Image: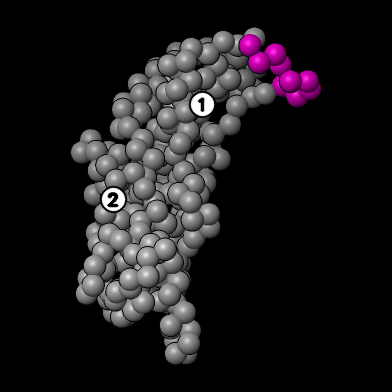
Amino acid sequence: MSTTTFSVTVRVWRQPGPGQPGRFVEYPVGGVNPDMSFLEMLDVLNDGLTRSGDEPVAFAHDCREGICGTCSLVIDGKPHGPHHGVASCQTYMRSYKEGDVIVVEPFRARPFPVIKDLVTDRSAFDRIQQAGGFISARTGSAPEANSVPVPKEVADLAMDAAQCIGCGACVAACKNSSAMLFVAAKVSHLGLLPQGQPERDKRVLAMVSTMDGLGFGSCTNQYECSAACPKLISHDFIARMNRDYAKAVFRSAFRPVAAGAGD
């Protein structure tokens, strides 16, 4: 680890609770090592605040390995910070220099209300997944792995969609607070595979309906979402989901009603 240290100023959003007024507060942070992650720098800030008797800055974190998506921050106006294809926890202080002023704030979206300081409630994503993110699977012994062949290109595409960590950067980057990239990744992941076919129509209709009901905005195809995504998920999945949705609406309109339904 480098022995050279420097100082920065962090202008951080402080908000005591949900629905309460907040403001930016500036704090000097010294002894910053260029090999520190951004979250480790915030740890140094909080250590100093605690030692001086002030309340530390609340921010969410878990794995610190770019896997969980918990560390969702807007750094200098960009979700997850200045780099492409990394989460906040993978941003390192070597990206900054002596005297820099770094602005840190939470993800801004009505469906992501601020809990405290930099922590937001992103349980809206959980409700979207609960609405349709499942497959039917028989219980009992495991089926033969090769009994349902999946073309490699399809498997690769499904894995690309499955990389979504549900961080919400797509929502924070979008001027409309659209969740289309997140929902498209979840819909496409299961919709591409044979195991996801039985609920394919029901899934896309339920997840899109839940997304709309939770107050996420519409997509205007300007691709801020894929540009901010730490897993580089393509906006092409949005087009795929739109096709699935249109087909599901058409099929549901002409699907015969089962005998006895509605009696």
| Residue located 70% across and 13% down the image | 144
**Quarter occupied by residue 246:** top left
Which residue occupies the extreme right position in the image? Answer: 140
- Vertical order, 79 against 202 (above or below): below
Question: Which residue is label 2 attached to?
Answer: 83
**Viewer-nearest residue: 189 or 131:** 189
- Circle 1 packing at 10 Å, graded few (<14), some (14-19), many (20+), is many
| Residue, disc 1 | 190
- How far across and how far down the image is residue 2, in percent? 37, 65
Q: Residue at x 40, y 53 (%)?
A: 90
Residue at the image point whose x is 47% and y is 15% from the top: 152
Total numbered circles:
2
Disc 2 on helix, strand or loop?
loop
In the rendered image, residue 249, in percent from the top left (x then y), is placed at 41, 22
Q: What amino acid is at disc 2?
A: His
Q: Is residue 22 magenta?
A: no
Q: Nearer the viewer, residue 98 or 24?
A: 98
Provide residue 69's location: percent of width, then percent of height.
Answer: 46, 50
- Specify the principal SS of the magenta part: loop
Can residue 186 be seen? no
The magenta-colored residue range is 138-146
